[in-house]
Image (cartoon, rainbow, N blue to C red):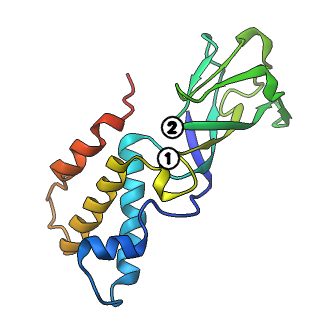
Amino acid sequence: MSSILLTAPAVEPLSLAEAKAFLRVEHNDDDDVIGSLIASARIHVEAQTRRALITQGWRLTRDAWPAAGRLNVVPAPLKALTAVRVYDGGGNAASLDLQSFVVDTAGSAIAFAPWAVAQPGRSVAGIELDITAGYGDAAGDVPEALRQAVRLLVAHWYENRGLATPGAVTVLPATVAALIAPYRMLSL
């Protein structure tokens, strides 16, 4: 299943003022750099955990419905299912009734009766699901461990702004890895 970001988060899990206080930066010369590091750290934590920290809109595509009638949704946590479309062989989309689906926000999954949903007519990306994912609309809605991971990444990258040498392996700092470990969604 591929995922396409439709609506980016409106805020970051860490404000510029919070980041500057954590970094002990009292000037405004690096505000753009620090702002970019905050966004990059959020994206990195999201990629490592397969979670959306702040509310975001995503489009998920699938080739076929799973026979078990359950779709595990990434990125998590799933907040809402907003649209479902199935494409016929000619590439025409048909919207499905959202009442045919049960949204399991706790398990970040969507359940349905596999025999009751329309089957796609094209073999690749025949199904599109639009979802809303994330912990909430404000930085305070994000679990503190993940916010701390963002802080530590921003600090690490701010202090180590030099170019990586060819062949060097970039490793996630151990403290960041430990903070995000309980939130990682592993695929089997």
Quadrant for residue 159, please give it.
bottom left
- Please state which of residues 58 and 90 is positioned toward the viewer in this rendering: 58
Expressed as whole percent of the image width and height from the top left, the position of residue 66 reads 61, 17
User: Is 87 drawn above or below residue 69 in the view shown?
Assistant: below
Dots 1 and 2: beta carbons under 8 Å?
yes
Q: How many marks?
A: 2
- Please state which of residues 13 and 81 is positioned toward the viewer in this rendering: 13
Viewed as shown, does residue 153 lie left or right of 136?
left
User: Is 35 drawn above or below residue 117 in the view shown?
Assistant: below
Quadrant position of the N terminus in the picture: top right
User: Is 85 drawn above or below residue 58 in the view shown?
Assistant: above
Residue under the image location 36 percent in, 54 percent down = 147
Residue under the image location 73 percent in, 22 percent down = 101
Expressed as whole percent of the image width and height from the top left, the position of residue 24 reads 23, 78
Expressed as whole percent of the image width and height from the top left, the position of residue 11 reads 53, 64
Sequence-first tag of 1 and 2: 1
Q: Identify which amino acid the numbered label 1 is placed on.
A: Ala
Q: Identify which amino acid the numbered label 2 is placed on.
A: Ala
Dot 2 falls on a residue whose secondary structure is loop
- Please state which of residues 161 and 108 is positioned toward the viewer in this rendering: 108
Residue 128 is labelled as none
Dot 1 falls on a residue whose secondary structure is loop
- In this view, which residue lies farthest toward the front? 140
Residue under the image location 78 percent in, 20 percent down = 100
Quadrant for residue 14, please give it.
bottom left
Residue wearing tag 1: 52
Residue 76 is labelled as 2
Quadrant position of the C terminus in the picture: top left
Residue under the image location 39 percent in, 32 percent down = 185
Expressed as whole percent of the image width and height from the top left, the position of residue 4 reads 59, 47
